[in-house]
Amino acid sequence: RNPAKAVKDVVESAAEKVADVLSPDVPGAPGSAPPAVGEPTTPHGPLPPKPEQGSPQTRTPTGARTGAPATATGQQGDFLTTSQGARLRDTDHALKAGPRGPVLLQDHHLREKITHFDHERIPERVVHARGAGAHGVFTGYGTAENVTRAAFLAKGRETEVFVRFSTVLGSRGSADTVRDTRGFATKFYTDEGTFDLVANNMPVFFIQDAIKFPDIIHAAKPHPDREIPQAQSAHDTFWDFVSLHTEAQHHTMWNMSDRGIPRSYRTMEGFGVHTFRLVNAAGETALAKFHWKPKLGVHSLVWEEAQLLGGIDPDFHRRDLYDAIEAGAFPEWELGIQVLPDTPEETFAGIDLLDPTKIVPEELAPVQPVGRLVLNRTPSNFFAETEQVAFHVGHLPPGIDVTNDPLLQGRLFSYVDTQLTRLGGPNFSQIPINRPHAPVNDMLRDGFHQHAVHAGVAPYRPNSLDGGNPFPAGDDDHPFVDVPVQVTAAPKIRQNPASFDDHFSQARLFWLSMSPVEREHIIRAYTFELGKCYHQAIKERQLRCLANIDPVLCAEVATGLGLPAPEPTLPLAEVTPSPALSQVGRQWPGDGRLVGIVVDSDADLDTVGQVRRAVFAADMVPLLIAPHGGRLGDLPVQRTFATGRSVELDAVLLATAPVPAPDALPARDARADAPGATTVDPRVLLLVQECWRHAKPIGAWDTGVAVLDRAGVSGTPGVVTGDTAADVFVGVQQLMAQHRVWERFPAPVG
Ligand code: HDD
């Protein structure tokens, strides 16, 4: 489904439906009271199944559809039963010896109910615990056929997918908008076996060898004594590790950049990080790096927004993902590959392709689009799908193979291992969300939570008792073939190649590729994070690392910390910047972006209605923000001055200058009493001022223009007024295409 068309359809048929999705105040919207179904006194059938309760839930471990009803795992009938199907008369009172007890041990229903509840939680992921998932479809372009025989990349081939986005450090209940790397894990249920692309939103990693993974994670997680801080890198152990273990400096720079605080999962790039080996039908190989390119471009929050959102809406990214899908603005990415020759050296343009702390700049090896991902379905059940999904970098289809990247090699071990604890045994691939859609015919047997009832007597090879089945696939049967890569004769050794010793050149490349405003953000991020460290030695050591990356960066951060800037200890690397790494200076579509419209009963509601339609027609979502909920005239109100906050908006339009309610506390801001001052509701002023500080476009018409004066933002960059509301929205829309009003940020660092 084309998201642009989807939104337009919504506009034409029922424009308000999309806004209603975001409106807890409108009857029938998610979050509002469900439609009246009568008092729950009479047995009646279950609610109709959600349409998305199809595959993969209804597949068997062998990939065949069971034909079971879509609600197979939901409520199935009129009456409450035990887990064994016996109808129950009472689930509210324990069985007692008389009304005053004691409770009898023989009450099986009591024990079953409580025991099951006691075991509802499973261990959260040791990393990437906080996540949100969605179903979707991947469509191949056929452009990769010359380099890989992976069938799901064939032209027009559609493959179901499940994607889980995540933060790395925080617990399951932590906030979405913290400064961190984001996971971007995709399960392609291909006809030739599942392919898991377990990616991040940054193309490099902290460590070069998986044996260091426990070290970096122990350092970055909360301190073991007091278990703080939660979901943050701004603490001593993290900076202790990365300043000592300097191969982490490149990834750390990405974290300190705007990439560490994405605006939305929809606006993140994704990277497979490692170099993979592709094999085509002729058996020829190429090396490749995987990239996800978001249709909406790469956008980030600003730091204050991220911090505010941590309190105002800790579920901001989750909500954004679900709302966008339910509104028909389906998140979309292109999968691309950088194809690199498979040479014995495994290098490209002097870059060691086995080193996961290095990128290959896109200017040297363009990212070639090979398919399109559209997320179009939210999960029916968080636990069953998002929590139980289990990814593995070793889940590869024929045509894609691993390389000797030592980080990748260690990951190949870790992912199954962690699921044994997390999902309770070796049969986690039988959990519905993990079931392959390709037929499964393995000889794995028994174990905890075995759901399959295997027939036959000979799960071994060779056998004659089961007719010799199953047989190995022949060359013409599309088997997975390990590429017979030559292993060089070398001594067994705990050591990396010498090229892995370069820890600063690409951190410098990243820094030099940033626009001035992005550099300013990086400086502030380092200064904030190091400023939260207690140990002087750690700050000084990290400054010494920054000196080896760039003297301006080092000097600016040192000034912020009140410390002297050290001299570099290594020559500064000669690098060519990669403009593709910058987020600034490009124009992007605005699909699904949120435009707040401040209204009250004094506003010209006909004009507001027209602007609202124009916002829909631009594939964006208008949110009316009014003094009270319900409706203004015919228009549904999505936010009130109490519930609407600037941080969820991408732009704000002012159709009026709302005065504070006489009995509101605080009724007026102090300046309202100044001679000649126009009184504006302080919550609206705060909203406008925050939007301004966060460099969001602001537009006003009619009396709304007075708010700009009161907020002190009139005539500044990115503040649009005009003769008609339509002109104002067009101006704001143009500004939104570049995401932020970049000129509003402080003077750039040279
Ligand atoms: Fe990992 C989860 C991505 C290195 C060990 N990893 C996990 C997830 C993502 C990544 C996106 C969440 C999957 C989900 O949503 O369920 N990990 C990466 C990337 C890496 C990386 C891009 C480097 C390029 N990881 C890495 C190393 C190790 C692990 C080096 C261990 C040696 N990762 C794990 C894990 C997790 C995991 C412990 C935790 C939960 C899980 O696997 O299923 O096995």
Image: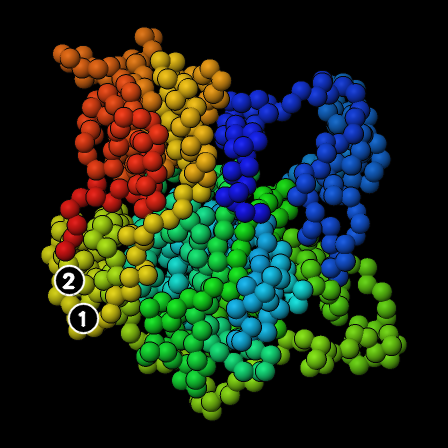
Q: Residue at x 36, y 24 (%)?
A: 598
Q: Is 473 situated above or below 95?
A: below
Callout 2–callout 1 Cβ contact below 8 Å? yes
Query: Secondary structure beneath disc 1?
Result: loop
**Along the horizontal axis of the image, is 299 left or right of 374?**
left
Foreground residue, 589 or 182? 589
How many neighbours does mark 1 have within 10 angstroms: few (below 14), some (14-19), or many (20 or more)? some
Q: Residue at x 21, y 22 (%)?
A: 710
Residue 597: where, in percent of width, then height?
A: 38, 27
Amino acid on which the number 1 mark rests in the picture: Leu
Q: Quadrant of the C terminus?
A: bottom left
Q: Residue at x 39, y 51 (%)?
A: 297
Residue 81: where, in percent of width, then height?
A: 80, 34
Q: Residue at x 21, y 37 (%)?
A: 717
Does the image show residue 312?
no
**Along the horizontal axis of the image, is 722 left or right of 377?**
left
Residue receiving disc 1: 572
Residue 463: where, in percent of width, then height?
A: 83, 79
Does the image show residue 65?
yes
Residue receiving disc 2: 551
Instruction: Identify the mark nearer the N-term, 2 or 1.
Output: 2
User: Furthest residue to the bottom?
Assistant: 489
Amino acid on which the number 2 mark rests in the picture: Pro
